[in-house]
Image (tube, grey):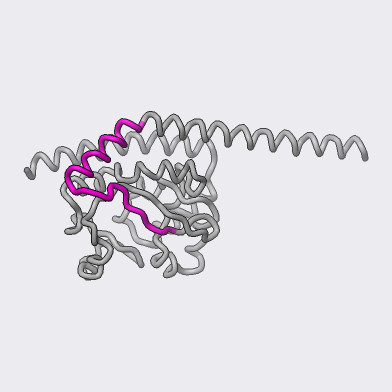
Amino acid sequence: MEEYDTQKRLLIDNSRLVINMKKVLYTLFILCLVAFSMPLLLAIGVIVAITTGFPIIFRQKRIGKNGKIFTMYKFRTMVKNAEVLQKKYASMNEAHGPVFKLYNDPRYTRFGKFLAHTGLDELPQLYNVLAGDMALFGPRPLPVAEEKKLEAWQKKRKHIKPGIFSPWILEGYHATSFDAWMKSDIAYIKNKSFWYDTQLFIRMIAYMGSLIGHVIIDDIIYL
């Protein structure tokens, strides 16, 4: 019995060691991403400040793991009173379900539209990852008001940390139905693993490169 207890403790200690090592490696990886992205972050911040003034960063309360409310950061892509103006364009909403989305939102600034369409506006969320409120991959965090409108089964997406990137983005983004989005998030929770996230990261890099290329070409055509 004593030998069994000893083996059990060793297994628990080893599993804790593996978990702690994964956390350390994950944090180091995020720090490397921040360091690699820093020139781009600074450049975007300067351009936003020059073209549209301050604030450079947009802050919004979002729902995180287990319903925790946190402040999410992103580069400001819209005019300063954008949240007030949203009601004005409510009838133009192109998204399904309780969320609001307009691809060519009139509230976008010119540079902000480029940032939003390429996903580069989300880069400041690397800070949210370092702060422990978000992960690199996971369900996209919803604003508090939109989260309250979810059905009970859809709220299962809150069982893990929200992410900067979501498989849903690769599956069609807002072109899919709202239910399909929620089902994608719940499926990710069931399939989440180190190797799955690695595959998603590679696919997301390729997707971002393609997206930026298409947006740049579109901007040149419509100049």
| Front residue of this view, candidates 177 and 204 | 204
Q: Could you say where residue 160 lies in the image, as x and y percent from the top left?
A: 53, 52
| Front residue of this view, candidates 117 and 186 | 117
Screen quadrant of the C terminus: top left
* Residue at (37% x, 57% y) in the render: 60
Q: Residue furthest right?
A: 1
Q: Is residue 50 magenta?
A: yes
* Residue at (34% x, 60% y) in the render: 177
* Residue at (59% x, 34% y) in the render: 22
Span of residues in magenta:
37-62
Q: Is residue 117 magenta?
A: no
Q: Residue furthest front?
A: 54
| Front residue of this view, candidates 28 and 149 | 28
Screen quadrant of the N terminus: top right
Badge count: 0
* Residue at (31% x, 38% y) in the render: 207
Q: Is residue 154 left or right of residue 22?
A: left
Question: How would you classify the magenta stretch by its main secondary structure?
Answer: helix
Q: Is residue 65 left or right of residue 76?
A: right
Is residue 56 shown above or below 90?
above
